[in-house]
Amino acid sequence: MDDVEIRELRYFVTVAEELHFGRAAERLHIAQPALSKAVQRLEMRLGIRLFARTSRTVALTPAGEALLQHGRHAISAMRMAVQAARQAGGAEPLRLAMKPGGDAGLLSDLLGEYATHPGATEVDILFHSGAQRAELVRSGQADAALLYTPFEAAEGLRTVVLHVEDRVAVLRSDHRLATRASLTTSDLDGEASPRWEGAGDGAEGPAIATVAELVPLVRLGRVVAVLPRSLVGLPPEGIACVPVSDAGRSSIVIGCRRNDTRESVAALMRAAEAMSAPASSRRARRSA
């Protein structure tokens, strides 16, 4: 029996996920008859039935379920192997994960500084709204990420602080506290808080992933939230932002894997360190 080709495995997994040859063919951008024949050839070579077909339904056989489980792992391993080879050969751009709007206006300056460092390469921005950007770096799906600490755990990463800021309460503009010059966390006792996806903060309010999802809930008076000031920016209509004096400050940091020795990543971290240095030090370096 010949080995299964990765292309055949990808065809099988797509059909197994869709349980519909037409939809699978659309995902794969091939003709449905060609996909059906490819799966039939795979079944003949393996000597087993992977799908139980009727005129109306497609279902996995026990053998098909086993192949699906291991086939996904095989495809993922192949993808990671190709990605690692391209990275080692310098053929791929650096991938920087960030929350949409989560750079406090620093991204342009950071990329400009990065471009001046030896080893700099093209940068792809991966926008990710959830709280798993650090995990994207740990798993190798991103090379670096902009993170809000202490909300996002950066354990195991090498980090450089780019920006430190206070936190504000995001309130409906006619909220009883909206006209205060500042608040304390105790002033917000009893207020409903949103549950940020992936944050695991124990809140019991509506689940949200972005500030854009938060704003309508605040306008309706369903929740209040305490956020880093830069995430809110200029308060939208109907929204008030009041500093929370004892909420602690938050930081925007850039993080990469500690064991990532590629020159493109090292250049990015050097650029971040240059960005975080006092302005006088930056001017001195550039004039040297």
Image (tube, rainbow, N blue to C red):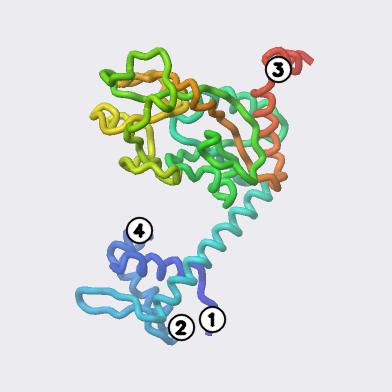
In three-dimensional space, the C-alpha distance between marks 1 and 3, rounded to whole angstroms, equals 61 Å
Q: How far is disc 2 from disc 3 in space, using C-alphas?
A: 65 Å
Mark 4 and mark 3 residues within 8 Å of each other at the beta carbon: no
Task: Determine the residue positioned at 29% across, 23% down.
Answer: 172
Residue for badge 3 = 282
In the picture, measured across the screen, residue 26 lies left or right of residue 43, that is: left
How packed mark 1 is, by other alpha carbons closer than 10 Å (few <14, some 14-19, many 20 or more), is few
Residue 177 drawn at (x, y percent): 33, 19
Toward the right, the furthest residue is 288
| Residue 282 is at least partly visible in this image | yes
Determine which residue is flagged by label 1. Answer: 2
Alpha carbon of mark 4 to alpha carbon of mark 1: how far?
26 Å
Check disc 4 and report its element: helix, strand or loop. helix
Which image quadrant for residue 146?
top right
**First reached walking from the N terminus: tag 2 or tag 3:** 2
Give the residue type that dot 2 points to.
Arg
> Could you tell me how far apart the alpha carbons at marks 4 and 3 are, in whole angstroms?
50 Å
Say which residue label 4 marks: 27
Task: Say which of marks 2 and 3 sits in front.
Answer: 3
Q: Residue furthest left?
A: 56
Amino acid found under the numbered disc labelled 4: Arg
Neighbourhood count class around disc 4 (C-alpha, 10 Å): few under 14, some 14–19, many 20 upward? few
Q: Which mark is residue 45?
A: 2
Assess whether mark 2 and mark 1 are in contact (beta carbons under 8 angstroms): yes
